[in-house]
Structures are given as structure tokens and as C-alpha cells.
Image (cartoon, rainbow, N blue to C red):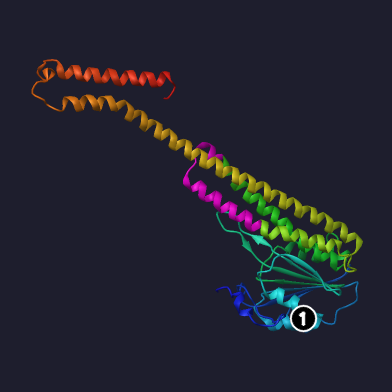
């Protein structure tokens, strides 16, 4: 499926709902989690009306939507939860950078979960949109399958703090898993960098240069996804919104620190890759210099020999050496002595 271009939005008023991006799911799938400290309900729903009415604040509702191509479902969800048309527009435009918007009654966040990066695969980016309300969390993903299965299992088995905390903590855990996955991706890329670095020391090849360029592109891609996320998390932490409780704010601050750590690691890898590229270019240049040195030495040795051969190749009538009985072996002896003498001088000067 080809990506839908932004030009489809040209001339339309702000808030017009059009899906811009690649269709990554065959059908839209809606799942519902509703839980409190003692009970949990999990089901797949066909209509958003099945999620209403929302219970009291002690019960948390998490609705996850996989697949964004069915615009009518997004419109219905916007009507039911009072979502601003600009927020819905950002959800459908899957080329957004990570950001945070405070709409008062709810908070809106966009993140970019990343996958791939191993076995020479390019990094694949997906857009995750999170709407945090007082007792509900809405998540919108481009495809089925995500990194949130550990959270679902914690809700089912009542492990950890999820069932005991509010909707803000659920939103935190979702974002925390996305950031944790960045560390997994960085570990994979770090191992590849170490492999290439070791190979560069032994024997650099043109394939290594291509691998370094691919890794540099992936670092740029990763940086573009993580850098604005730091700003978004900082905005959420400092927003003083009533949706975020004080105890959850401590976790958000820790998540912000993790994001800074990811950015620092990315910057370190970028510096290492730049140094590796310099090492490769230097190694290739030194190898070329060694080859040119050997060829120059060979050519220098053969310059006097070529001169002698050229002189005796003229075949003038009055060249006495042409009639000497030992002339031919003598010329060979002279040429061999010249070659050995020049090799000795090169060795003495440590040019070989």
C-alpha cells in the first residue's frame, strides 16, 4: 500500500479528518480493558458504544485502537470522549513528531515506537497516540501487535502498581515500555557498531563503509524520534495538570531521565560512527599509499635497467660490446647488481 501524501490536505480547513500515512492493518481492531483494584474486564468490542458509560474514577478504562484507516471510528470516538478535531487530525496524520498537548479535560501525547535494526533491517517507526483522561486512557496504533503485552499481563494478574494506581500511571507505563524498547534497539545497534569497529582494525573493506553509513542514517532517524519526546515528557511533567498525580510525577521524572540517557547514548554512537568512518578512510588511504610505495619502488629499480636495455637495443654498427663473447652475461650481471644495490639502499633507509 502506497503512503498517502500530505497534498491531500492542501486547501482543506484545519481539523479535517483524513488518514495520511500507510495502511498497516487489514481491519480496525478495538480492545477494552476495564479494571480496578479487585476486578478486571477484557474484551474486544465492535462498537464504541459498548465502552460507555464510563464508570466512576476508581475504575480505569483503557481502549486501544489498532488501525487508523477507518476515519468514521475516529470521529465516533471523538464525539464520545469530547476530543478536539485537531487532536483527531494529529492521530490520523501518522507523520507527526512526538509532542504533548494539554486540552484541559484530557492530555494528548504522540510517541514513535521503533522496531527493527537487527540483521541489517532498517528501523521501522510507528505512531502511537495516547489520550489521558481522568479515569480513561485511549491509545491509537497503526498496526496490530505492540510492546504492551507485559502491561496487559500485569493488569490480568494484578502484579505491580497498575491496578492500584490511576489512569495517569497506566499512561506512564505505556510510555515507559516505548522508551525501554529504545534501549533494546540501542543495544542491538551497539553490538553491530562493535563488530564493525573490530573488523576495521583487522581489515577494512568497502562493505564496512556501507554499513557505517547505514548505521549513521539509523542514528539520525532514532535521534529525530527521541529528541522531541524529551520535550513532550518534560511538558507533561511540568504542566501541573490535575490529571497527573504527584506520585505519578515522580515516575514521569524518572522516565524523562531515561529519555535523556537514550539521547546521550545516540549522540555517543554518532561520534563513534564518525570516528569509525575516519578510521576507515585513513586505513584505505594508508593501504593505497603502501601499494603506491611498492609500485614506485619497483618502477625505480627498473628505471636504470630499462636505460641499459634501451642503450643496447639500439644496435649501432660500432658498438664494441655487441661482439664481446661475455657481453650478454656481463650486462645481466650489471643489471642484477644494480637491482640488488638499490634494494639494499631501500632497506637501509627503511622504505621497505
Asked whether residue 303 is drawn in magenta, I would say no
| Residue 158 left/right relative to 326 | right
Query: Disc 1 marks which residue?
Result: 78
**Residue drawn at (48%, 36%), measured in percent from left and top?**
286
**Residue drawn at (22%, 24%), measured in percent from left and top?**
308
Q: Residues within 10 Å of mark 1 (few under 14, many from 20)?
A: some
Q: Please state the horizontal and vertical placement of residue 48, each as a whole percent of the image.
A: 76, 82
Quarter of the picture containing the C terminus is top left
Q: Quadrant of residue 179?
A: bottom right
Find numbered disc 1 in the image and state the secondary structure of the residue it sits on: helix
The residue nearer to you, when weighing 172 against 220, is: 220
Q: Please state the horizontal and vertical placement of residue 251, each as a whole percent of the image.
A: 84, 57
Q: Which residues are magenta?
A: 198-222
Q: Quadrant of residue 17?
A: bottom right
Q: Please state the horizontal and vertical placement of residue 182, each as a whole percent of the image.
A: 69, 56
Residue 120 sits above or below residue 272 on the image = below
| Residue 255 left/right relative to 189 | right
**Residue drawn at (75%, 77%), measured in percent from left and top?**
86
Provide the major secondary structure of the magenta segment.
helix
Asked whether residue 212 is drawn in magenta, I would say yes
Amino acid at each position: 500500500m502506497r503512503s498517502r501524501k500530505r497534498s491531500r490536505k492542501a486547501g482543506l480547513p484545519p481539523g479535517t479528518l483524513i488518514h495520511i500515512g500507510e495502511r498497516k492493518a487489514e481491519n480496525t481492531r478495538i480492545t477494552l480493558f476495564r479494571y480496578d483494584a479487585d476486578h478486571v474486564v477484557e474484551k474486544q468490542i465492535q462498537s464504541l458504544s459498548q465502552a460507555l458509560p464510563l464508570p466512576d474514577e476508581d475504575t480505569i478504562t483503557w481502549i486501544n485502537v489498532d488501525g487508523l484507516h477507518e476515519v468514521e471510528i475516529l470521529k465516533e470516538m471523538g464525539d464520545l470522549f469530547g476530543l478536539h478535531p485537531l487532536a483527531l487530525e494529529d492521530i490520523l496524520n501518522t507523520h507527526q513528531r512526538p509532542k504533548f498537548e494539554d486540552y484541559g479535560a484530557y492530555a494528548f501525547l504522540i510517541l514513535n515506537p521503533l522496531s527493527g535494526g537487527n540483521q541489517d533491517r532498517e528501523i521501522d517507526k510507528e505512531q502511537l497516540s495516547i489520550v489521558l483522561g481522568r479515569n480513561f486512557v485511549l491509545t491509537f496504533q497503526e498496526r496490530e501487535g505492540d510492546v504492551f503485552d507485559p502491561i496487559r499481563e500485569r493488569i490480568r494478574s494484578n502484579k505491580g502498581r497498575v491496578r492500584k494506581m490511576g489512569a495517569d500511571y497506566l499512561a506512564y507505563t505505556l510510555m515507559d515500555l516505548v522508551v525501554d524498547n529504545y534501549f533494546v534497539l540501542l543495544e542491538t545497534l551497539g553490538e553491530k557498531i562493535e563488530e564493525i569497529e573490530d573488523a576495521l582494525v583487522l581489515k577494512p573493506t568497502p562493505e564496512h563503509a556501507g554499513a557505517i553509513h547505514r548505521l549513521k542514517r539509523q542514528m539520525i532517524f532514532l535521534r529525530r524520534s527521541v529528541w522531541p519526546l524529551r520535550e513532550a515528557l518534560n511538558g507533561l511533567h511540568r504542566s501541573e495538570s490535575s490529571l497527573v498525580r504527584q506520585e505519578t510525577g515522580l515516575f514521569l521524572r524518572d522516565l524523562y531521565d531515561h529519555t535523556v540517557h537514550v539521547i546521550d547514548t545516540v549522540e555517543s554512537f554518532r561520534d563513534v560512527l564518525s570516528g569509525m568512518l575516519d578510521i576507515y578512510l585513513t586505513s584505505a588511504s594508508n593501504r593505497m599509499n603502501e601499494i603506491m610505495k611498492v609500485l614506485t619502488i619497483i618502477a625505480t629499480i627498473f628505471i636504470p635497467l630499462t636505460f641499459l636495455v634501451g642503450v643496447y637495443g639500439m644496435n649501432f654498427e660500432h658498438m664494441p660490446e655487441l661482439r664481446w663473447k661475455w657481453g650478454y652475461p656481463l650486462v645481466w650481471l650489471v643489471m642484477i647488481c644494480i637491482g640488488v644495490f638499490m634494494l639494499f639502499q631501500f632497506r637501509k633507509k627503511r622504505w621497505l
